[in-house]
Amino acid sequence: MEHQTLRKTLKPIHLWSIAVGMVISGQYFGWNYGFSEGGVVGMMIASLLVTAFFACFIFSYAELSTSIPNAGGPSAYAARALGPFGGYVAGIACLLEFVFAPPAIAVSTGAYVHFLIPSASPVWVTTGIFILFILINMVGMKGAALIELIATVIALVGLALFYTAGLPHVSLDRLVPADAPPLAAGGVLAAVPFAIWFFLAIEGGAMAAEEVENPKRDIPRGFISGILTLATATVLTLLVTAGLGGGEGKPADYPLPQALSGVYGEGHWVVVAVTMIGLIGLIASLHGIIIGYSRQTYALSRAGYFPKFLSRLNRHGVPVWGLLLPGAIGVVCAGSAAFASALIELAVFGAVLMYCLSMISLFVLRYKEPGLERPFRVAFPVVPAIALALGLLFLYCVVRYSMLVKTMPVLGVDIPLWAVIVAIYAAAVLYYAMKGRHSVAADRTIVAERP
């Protein structure tokens, strides 16, 4: 049997767990590549800028998500403010984030398992875990949200253990190295794309908005509690990892166990425990972002942007093809552990572009639709203006220090990241011109009539 409406089963704690769970792996890996770009001090400054951005962004985003509680999230806001094509551009940006982030997380999952069991093949673990959680998501949102809640709580316990074990051994000399090169603005800006990984995908909770029992009340509670949780964790994770020497040498896909092992040794129970719990954190994010991309694909299909079969729901209310097709792309990417850093940077580009479009949409909607019901109102215009200004700065950072200078291997050829983005958007715009624009105008689920 086919259902057309997502089921309302989520409470604030579920939304908190989805928002935090989507991000929690960013505490366990990925961000540490920023040490190579800006050094310890540069990474700290970049992380402070990013934390300030997300604090302003998430309050602004709460206004959008409660005003327009739609599974499309940013594509719905942009479509309402900027028209169908604006919604499509934002939707593709969101899919860039949510399709490329899971394989990067899966690659790190394989690295964590390999750290624990050297004989385990990272590639087989990576692809196996990814496929397993795609299948788990077939059970429906209520069961998926329960799994996400449990995994998120366990991952936070793992971080608490890391802080407890590491804080007594933090060295001030490692936080501010005496022999560090002079701090340069370029190093700080180059570290920004990796600092964003601390918070990347927190906005994905908005894609579960249609499945929240009371979105007007519960979405702000879930988002705001989520950003407070993650901001606290970011400060402590960066402080402890850098203070244990985690900013030295070649970045690893398991920075927390690597930093602890320098104090306790690789076989110590604390190192093993943090590694094992870190796996739960990675799984929480992988599982949560799979929820996010499936709902984004569902919403874009339902609105007419994508083929209609992608919005078909099974008897559990799950968009099956919206889950499986992007998942297949992710599994293929995850099968090559050679470009985990490139996957992170592609995901960050999509995220930052979407953040900027969302903030622009907020300003446009305030002007065009002053009478729109806004159950939660951000301090306008100061807070969204700060978010937009920092978002545009971050977009420059990602383009200047990642897209224009870095590559990823595709079939044995190193392809510039900017070329990957251009190819994806060229294909997307071509599809929209040939087919999508003819069907989207008749659908009112995303492009609502003006009051």
Image (cartoon, helix red, strand yellow):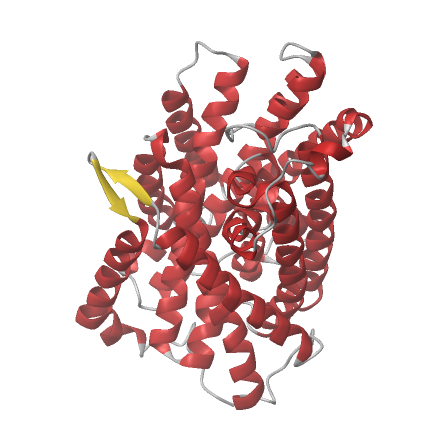
Q: Quick one: which residue is furthest to the left in this view?
A: 434
Left or right: residue 415 compared with residue 248: left
- Residue ID at (55%, 89%): 367
Left or right: residue 271 compared with residue 92: right
- Residue ID at (68%, 45%): 234
Q: Quick one: which residue is furthest to the right in this view?
A: 168
How many badges with numbers are in the image?
A: 0
Left or right: residue 238 compared with residue 312: right
In the displayed structure, 440 sits above or below 72; it is below
Instruction: Say if residue 153 shows up in the picture.
Output: no
- Front-most of 156 and 254? 254
Instruction: Say if residue 64 shows up in the picture.
Output: yes
- Residue ID at (64%, 9%): 267
The image shows residue 332 at horizontal and vertical percentages of 30, 36
In the displayed structure, 360 sits above or below 215; it is below
- Front-most of 326 and 272? 272
The image shows residue 25 at horizontal and vertical percentages of 57, 38
In the displayed structure, 434 sits above or below 83; it is above
Q: Quadrant of residue 353?
A: bottom left
- Front-most of 265 and 343? 265
The image shows residue 416 at horizontal and vertical percentages of 28, 49
- Front-most of 317 and 419? 419
The image shows residue 147 at horizontal and vertical percentages of 59, 36
Q: Quadrant of residue 179?
A: top right
